[in-house]
Image (cartoon, rainbow, N blue to C red):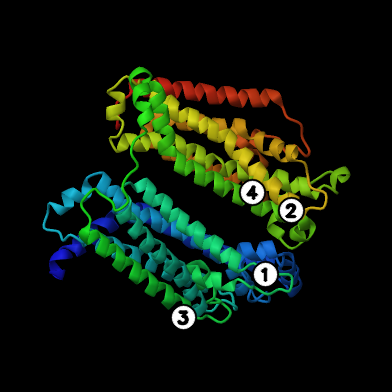
Amino acid sequence: MIHKNFANTSRLIKLMLKRERVISSIWLVILVLFSVSLVPGLAQMFSDQDEMATFAQTFSDPTMLAMLGPLYDANSIGGMFAFMMLLWTQIAVGLMNVFLVVRHTRADEELGRVEVIRSLPVGRLATSAATMLTVVFINGALAISTGVGIALMGETSMSLAGSILYGTLLGTFGIFCAAITAIFAQLCVSSRTALALGGITIVFSYILRAVGDMPNEYGDMPNEILSYLSPMGLLQRSQVFVKDDWLPVLYVLLISAMLFAVAFALDRVRDMGQGFIPAKPGLSRWKKIEKTTPNITSLMLSVRLCKNAMIWWLVGMFILAASYGSILGGISDFIEGNEFYGELMVELPPELMNFQEKSFVSTIAIMLSICGVIPVLVTLFKLRTEEKRGMLEQILSGAVSRRRNLANYTIIAMIMSVLTPFISALGFYVSALAVMEDPLSFSFFIENLMVYVPATWVMLGVGTFLVGILPKATVACWGMLGFSIFVMFFGRVLGLPEWLEFTTPFGYIPLLIIEEINWLTMVTLTGIAAILTVIGFVGYQKRDMIS
């Protein structure tokens, strides 16, 4: 009976690995390079003990310790590396695994792929088993590659055993996220809900750990038990590069195995295409409106499809902005102890040297604005996702035109392009209000973030152009965004030519602390965005669907 349930699992593993050869390879390369490449940078940044001591003092604030966790060793590069990098890399690894599991379970079931596979001599649980083993293989490859890569950097405080443990901590958290998401894939009817719950799990794990790691006025952590209840906090107790304790890894792997067992049990009794949590019924009050005003109904459907991602992106942007706002209370010490941000910040003229807080806000506003483009493009490209899944046929076969359908997602994306910088400014201001004796005005934060809206519209225009004219090339828009992040955020640190900034729309936006707004430039950027959008609408009306 067991053999029958898992028949041909090995063939499914080969199929899944073949499907993952591009997506997961990109994830692995980025994650490994991100971890490995920062080792020599930290070694250069903390070239002596005084710089380490200054940095440790800067981040001794309770808010920063809650953000990053306890600093177990402030006297070694390895201890500083784990303190600064482990949590954020774990979050990225967790997201990779959430997407991976949903992609091969609930999403494939929605598209009918699992039904086709089960029509062959394949066991009932073979899909879940193959997904689990694929997860283990990919996270194992991540752990080994990261560990060996860090060890090869030759930093004396980062031994091979400690480096392998660091990589294993990443892979272990990824396996845990995959296991809990496998359960959500069985409970939920839609892949969107499963993805949302997987993301919520990562956020909840982080918040639970943050509350547990929050020290009191005496430096103690009275709620540390909460950190042990969080897999993220528990793995941090391995004290990698300090004590190298493997016991937390074994605990989390054991919990993950039990979660996978629950997912198998649910998959065994669940009907194909169904979930244990029923889908919400449609909005009955819109049935009468649908007959008379189908355009309004199609807009509400687009909002409903995008709302979960929109909400979580807004929450994430608020938290990200608030984390930077918490630094404003001791910005001078932070800049002195952090060479990277010191080089990143714009040089102020002599008469503005006492305005470091404003310079920091103007600099970070660039990063927040570019990151704010991501939810805008995600919202727009949701249309392309629905098209590839064949979900637009019923909508377009009715009274809703193609242009109206594209307009729905464009309107929502436009709203996000304004709402995201507003929420970021709010997070920045609320956090600064709590730590600064003389806080900056809310209008200052709004101005520094809203000024980038025309550049965001250009990116939205490029996305609309690609959706309408070259739908298969929408990935180029993400490449353009990545190039903008590299040039605008790392170009000054790496000493790249200044003219490279003008190859992105964000390079034309002034830093308000030293420049005034050039309204001709703003109108020009808006005009370019409008032209690209119109061309996209014309192309979308004429081209074939799923092309």
In screen coordinates, is 155 left or right of 468?
right
Neighbor class of circle 2 (other Cα within 10 Å; few <14, some 14-19, many 20+) is: few
Q: Residue furthest top?
A: 292
Quick one: quadrant of the C terminus? top left
Q: Which residue is mark 2?
A: 434
Residue at 40% from the left image edge and 66% from the top image edge: 176
Q: Mark 1 or mark 3: which is in front? A: 1
Quick one: quadrant of the N terminus? bottom left
Q: Which residue is mark 1?
A: 215
Q: CA distance from mark 3 to mark 2?
A: 38 Å
Query: Who is closer to the viewer here, 493 or 276?
Result: 276
Neighbor class of circle 3 (other Cα within 10 Å; few <14, some 14-19, many 20+) is: few
Q: CA distance from mark 4 to mark 1?
A: 22 Å
Q: CA distance from mark 2 to mark 1?
A: 17 Å
The answer to the question of whether label 4 and label 3 lie on touching residues, with beta carbons closer than 8 A, is: no
Q: CA distance from mark 1 to mark 3?
A: 24 Å
Element at badge 1? loop
The answer to the question of whether label 4 and label 2 lie on touching residues, with beta carbons closer than 8 A, is: no
Tag 4: amino acid: Ala
Q: Is residue 410 above or below residue 420?
A: above
Q: CA distance from mark 4 to mark 3?
A: 35 Å
Q: Which mark is residue 247?
A: 3
